[in-house]
Amino acid sequence: IKAGDLIGHLGLYQDSDADQPEKKLHLETFSGDDVEAFIDACRIWAERLPEKDRTWLKLAKGTPVVAPEGHTAAQMQMASDSSPRSAADLLVPKKLLDGLPPDRKIQVPANPTRNARTWYRLENLLHDADNNLLDGWVCEESGVTPWVSPWDWEGYDVIIDFSRPKHMLASFLSAVGGFSDAQRERYRPIAEKDDKGPMKNRLYAIIDRNRDGKMTAAELQAALELPAHAQSISQMILYKESEWFEQPKIWDALDELLGHSGSTPHLNWLAEKQRIAELGWWRDVAEKVGLPSWGSAYHFHPIGMLGHFANTVNGMLSCKICGVTLKLTSDFLSEICGNEVNPLFISAMVDAAKHLFKKYGLDSCEQITHLLAQAKKETGGFVHFRESLNYSRRTYTAARLYRLSPTVINAGFSRKGLSFSSEEEKLAWIDEHLIGNDVAYGLHCYGNSEKPGKDFRGRGLIHLTHYETYKKCAKDTGLPIDSNPELLEKDFAVAIETALWFWKARRISAIAEDPTLNGDAGVTAVTRPINIGLAGLSERQKYKRDITEKFNANFDSRCKRND
């Protein structure tokens, strides 16, 4: 299959629990070539690749994770001996490490006795022996901690599995209580062909937490929530006969297990076998496309393999949770923006999704829909990238305006060295100088003595406010907004990137992706670091519902919640 080839279409799938069929894609990734020989050749080739192509940091099992607070690099090195240690290997992409904010990276230069080191603060990536996620600092030491190329296929194993559908069905019926005691004993040797096979052994080692010989849905979910375990599952390459290689005798072998015989026919099973026969395509195409005539192939985890190489593909953005490609389009953005929005903003947003979202860790369906909902409220529908401070006398008295923003108004008085003998005198000054005066209000409340004549009011896609915030953003992004704050309202690319910086700096991603915060409660939690007073909360909640609905329709997201 070459890049850009059409490989299939969405089809209607009728789930037994659903009222209506849904459009879905059944995707299998497999190869009939000798994958083991290919991987061996890749690994030899990878040894000759330059350092810049080694884009995965391997944090081996046993990596110390030092407590996150109150340490210098030297203290962390001393504390590492007594720190919790990771319980499994994990490959971490270089882009993730490069994208960490400055306060989560500490670089230590080389000295005569030690190589150069970098300490990274990682959250919820490594886990301990009790399967608890760890939050803390890990050390990458030049020449000691290995960097590997995707072409090393680090952690990948080929598993040859010869179990057949009758073995898998016997295992399933035994596990879910579908057998009587007599049947369980009778069919135990058949079930064990699957239970004790190499594929199940590998999965049991990862998933079966209480070692009772069963894999429950809860155990599977728990394993997938640990990045190292999820990664290990995705690295399994299974050599197995394809179910598309239809052989009647293989499915006839299930008759007894399903209670079908000539005297007691199982009509649903007979219909299912007919359906299976009609779906079997392998024999028709194998010779034409070079697939093996005997029906066996090497099967890969589709999302796992894509993620393994996506780290090196410029502009590719996929949801880290459900794997759907997140390529924002002009059509989708036009749906949620409306006719008043400048087309140049939509173009800038499409470009940012390609080149900036991944950089700032905005890589999930939930994050994107939350960001768009918050930004729509902050900018009045993606129209106003500059906060209006024109409080007219028709709506505001001096007393009401002072109650609205006492902190910033008093800060302005302090900056100007103004004091008043009475509350009435203060309110009179506010009435004369600030009511109905956008420019004066901005300079008084959001001015700064370091940058006279500039005000640092709310601007951008998510209104950045106050000089210190502008200054920190400028330092981290390289955008000169501390000296030219108007860039956030005039340059859409700057407006968007500063919002992405804010999102990452305030760690809103973890809130947006928290599975316990669904619907309006999730929007409330995301709003707090953006607007502590929760102004316009009901609108933000409505925008999130509306945008999520349009997003799911456009992207077939599998991160669907009741938003």
Image (spheres, helix red, strand yellow):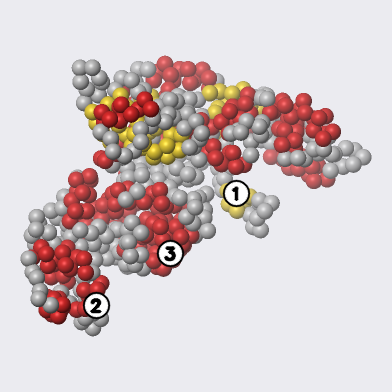
Label 3, on which residue? Answer: 541
Residue occupying the point 92% across, 40% down: 263
Q: Position of 194 compared to 406: left or right?
A: right
Observer able to see residue 500: no
Outermost residue to the right: 263
Q: Earlier in the sequence, mark 2 or mark 3?
A: 2
Residue occupying the point 47% across, 44% down: 321
Q: CA distance from mark 2 to mark 3?
A: 27 Å
Q: Position of residue 24 (x, y in %)?
A: 58, 48
Q: Residues within 10 Å of mark 1 (few under 14, many from 20)?
A: few
Name the quadrant containing residue 534: bottom left
Q: CA distance from mark 3 to mark 1?
A: 32 Å
Q: Position of 363 compared to 500: left or right?
A: right
**Mark 1 near mark 2, Cβ–Cβ under 8 Å?**
no
Q: Residues within 10 Å of mark 2 (few under 14, many from 20)?
A: few
Residue 11's disc number? 1
Q: Which element is circle 3 on?
A: helix
Position of residue 393 relative to residue 14, above or below, is below
Q: Earlier in the sequence, mark 1 or mark 2?
A: 1
Q: Position of residue 175 (x, y in %)?
A: 72, 37
Residue 400's disc number? 2
Name the quadrant containing residue 372: bottom left
Residue in front for this viewpoint, 35 or 53: 53
Name the residue type under label 2.
Arg
Residue in front for this viewpoint, 185 or 334: 185
